[in-house]
Amino acid sequence: MNGEKINSIFVIMFATAGLINSNYTLAVDMPAEGQAKCGTCHAIDKNIFGPSFMAISEKYKGDKDAANKIATSITMGGSFGWLFGSMPAKGLGANDSEIQFLSKFIADLAK
Ligand code: HEC
């Protein structure tokens, strides 16, 4: 038996397992709707062209009407005081039900 070869197979297996796991280190992933229509500019936990969804959630934390206010922002687009520039209305073409879903998703992040 070639012990060294078996060892290197184990190393590869563990390395692969690590890679797979690293996709799940975030507590939450961007929902599919958000990936396609928001993900160019937003991520959950870091700023890209727009603020992170977590930062937005913090802004509205404790506001009972957070999901509605966030939905209005997404629908209208524009500037909301983040100084990142301007967001296109409805992102990259999100429909109303996607906007409702994503607004609630964002509102719930920082709870
Ligand atoms: C082309 C880039 C771009 C896309 C696509 C985009 N956004 Fe934005 N978004 C921005 C920018 C830039 C800002 C910050 C504007 C500012 O500086 O005030 C922003 C801000 C926001 C805010 C903050 C609103 C507030 O009241 O503070 C929310 C919520 C948001 N985006 C959600 C979304 C969602 C959901 C999508 C997908 C449907 C999306 N965005 C798609 C660029 C984008």
Image (cartoon, rainbow, N blue to C red):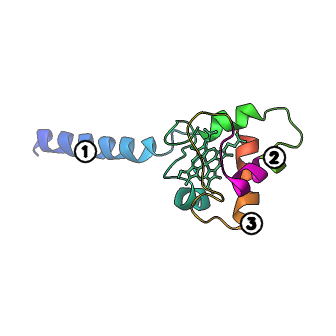
Which residue type carries mark 3? Asp
Q: Which mark is residue 107?
A: none
Question: Does residue 75 appear to the left or right of 83 in the view shown?
Answer: right
Instruction: Judge depth for marks 1 and 2 and give the one in front.
Output: 2
Q: Which mark is residue 12?
A: 1
Helix, strand or loop for the magenta stretch, by majority: helix
The residue where tag 3 is placed is 96
The residue where tag 2 is placed is 69
- Estimate the x, y position of residue 33 in percent, counting from the top left: 60, 61
Question: 53 above or below 94?
Answer: above
- Estimate the x, y position of residue 52 in percent, counting from the top left: 58, 38
Gap in angstroms between the C-alphas marked 3 and 2: 14 Å
Q: Do the residues labelled 3 and 1 touch (CB within 8 Å)?
A: no
* Rendered image quadrant of residue 19: top left
Gap in angstroms between the C-alphas marked 3 and 1: 46 Å
- Split into 4 quadrants, where in the image is the C terminus? top right
Which residue type carries mark 2? Lys
Mark 1 vs 2, N-terminal side: 1
Mark 2 falls on what kind of element? helix
Question: 100 above or below 87?
Answer: below
Magenta-colored span:
70-80
Q: Does the magenta stretch include residue 79?
A: yes
